[in-house]
Amino acid sequence: MIRNFLCISSIYLSVILSASDLSAQIRLPRLISDGVVFQREAKLKIWGWASANEDVSLFFKGKNYKTRADLHGHWQIIIPNQTAGGPFEMTFKGKNEITVHNILFGDVWVCSGQSNMELTMERVKEKYSSTIASSDNINIRQFLVPDSYDFKQVHDDVEGGSWEHANPKNLLTFSAVAYFFAKEIYEKEHVPIGLINAALGGSPAEAWISEDGLINFPNLYSEFLKFKDDKLIQEIETNDKNRISNWYKELNGKDEGMVNAHTWADPKLNDSDWAEMMVPGYWADVSLKSVNGSVWFRRKINVPKSLIGKSAKLWLGRIVDQDSVFINGKFIGTTGYQYPPRKYEIGSSVLQEGENIIAVRVINNSGRGGFVPDKPYYVAGTQDTVKLTGIWKYRLGAAMPALVGPTAIRWKPVGLYNKMISPLLTHAIKGVIWYQGEANTQRPEEYRKLFPALITNWREKWNLGDFPFLFVQLANFMEPKASPSESNWAALRQAQLQALSLPNSGMAVTIDLGEWNDIHPLNKEDVGKRLALIAQRNAYKNKKIVYSGPIYSSMKVAGHTIEIFFSNRGGGLVAKGSDLKYFSIAGTDKKFVWAKAKIEGNKVIVWNEQVVNPVLIRYAWADNPEGANLYNKEGLPASPFSTEEK
């Protein structure tokens, strides 16, 4: 028994010593890994962890740098400024040895914001297929920061991720905006470009600000403090899960298209008594009205022989909110929320020559359910296409009360900063590109202070001075309106415009690049290029480049007209395509009406004969200012503005 005890004790001690040795080994942050891009011509901090007081050596370019870990196991080595180039290796030695391979020095850009920054090349691969095919470039690399949040503590490392260089396979995970930005910069500067992609769809600005940076926003700060409570988060998540699960369970149990012996996806189903509606369209506009729940749609299509025995694609535009698709009774695919474009692969054995039946079960949680107009709806092979727009049969599967969605805990204040930005702060950067604002459009007045606070907060935390902070102004979105009206989207664009008062900031105007029916417009190339133009000026000091469209600078009342003056006129002001549009004017009553406008030299004259004493002007002031056409001769659009506040 004593021998067994000694044996067990020996094993136990061995395990303890083994664990102790393991914890003592040198460890590097995930950003410092194979393929890393370090910022050129900047003081380089190389850091990591080891055991307390452990000696650490770094071998790099024939030199040996030495340091010792502190009592907490933290160590840091400063390397002199490096010029662009590579690849290099770094070898770290302590009680263990680590070699980091394929290191480049170039320019590192943090790419952050919400879904329009997060949106990948995968989403736009059909539009940019040739770009993807020719994308192989070891000098453009991305590190994708995992989506995560924490309200209780800041973090010094990310949860995962690796450096990937641009090629047709890897590129599909790159941010589309960031890639086109990097591609443009690389072609101009010919230095390696590292992209640190830290973006999350739906996130408001306050989620990306540190605790101390949010202290001047009491409402947001108090909300942050609430979510430090793990029990509260667990309670919310449990309630959300149960509520949503019960809603779908009830829906599926009531849906006549699923509970009958023959489901409504069955191609043999007799649907002669079903109602009809045009697709695309919304069932709120037909006899169903504004019902929530499930609605089934069916359509007969004739498929030519050329599509038989081959794979094909089914394009179903966008659907609000969820869909499950069947062809000839066979399940094709499903999408769980309204924003992604519906692109489904059809196997080679699914289609048959002649008549085929497509069935779509649509689930709408709230609002207007149906098929979004002005999107692609067809079946396509390599040669032939079968259109799906037109009359479809439809029938209500089950009516349900509106479903209250889940609480977006990960979007709450400070959480994303703590987990996705704080770990990046020791990595020197060239600057930031930012595409965000949609999530804050219900609070545009608050954004006027919140957005500059975020920029200032990041600059303070990185401690690199006023590095370039380049951002995208909100694109045009939603249906155009016939008359001048108030707009939260326009008000938030004004807040973004005012952020240009911060040094070394820049704004890409995109009111001509959006889509009225999609909050995620596909044209990411021009967004990236416009950001790159600003970077050429702000970050790379090209003083000759025209990097922006006209920006409102001042106004002067001249009788019954108002003269508007602009900076960033480039080669001169122009009206693209026709007479100037989308100016509105108001008198002291602040009731805006459409105005006439004309260019005279370096200014725009605005008037309306009915407004005798004009005092205010707005330009492109709408959710979707379709037709706004003031540009400079270099083809860059003027920013929307209101003269109420410069």
Image: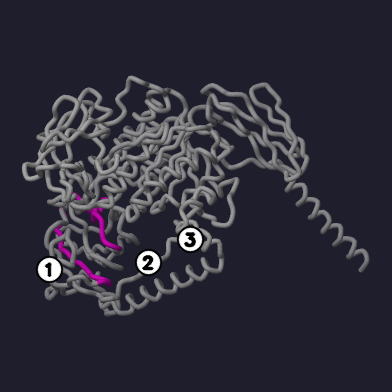
The image shows residue 604, relative to residue 26, as above or below, that is: above
Q: Secondary structure at mark 1?
A: strand
Asked if the stretch drawn in magenta spans residue 300, the answer is yes
Q: Amino acid at mark 2?
A: Gly
First reached walking from the N terminus: tag 1 or tag 2: 1
Q: What percent of the width, then of the height, locates residue 6?
A: 90, 61
Reading the image, the residue beneath label 2 is: 405
Query: What is the image's colouring?
Result: one colour
Q: What percent of the width, then of the height, locates residue 564?
A: 20, 33
Residue 223 badge: 3
Q: Quadrant of residue 316?
A: bottom left
First reached walking from the N terminus: tag 2 or tag 3: 3
Q: Quadrant of the N terminus?
A: bottom right
Q: Which residues are magenta?
A: 292-321
Q: CA distance from mark 3 to mark 1?
A: 48 Å
Residue at 35%, 61% (x, y): give it. 336
First reached walking from the N terminus: tag 3 or tag 1: 3
Q: Amino acid at mark 3?
A: Glu
Using a 10 Å C-alpha cutoff, classify the residue at mark 1 as few (fewer than 14 neighbours), some (14 to 19) or many (20 or more): some
Q: CA distance from mark 2 to mark 3?
A: 19 Å
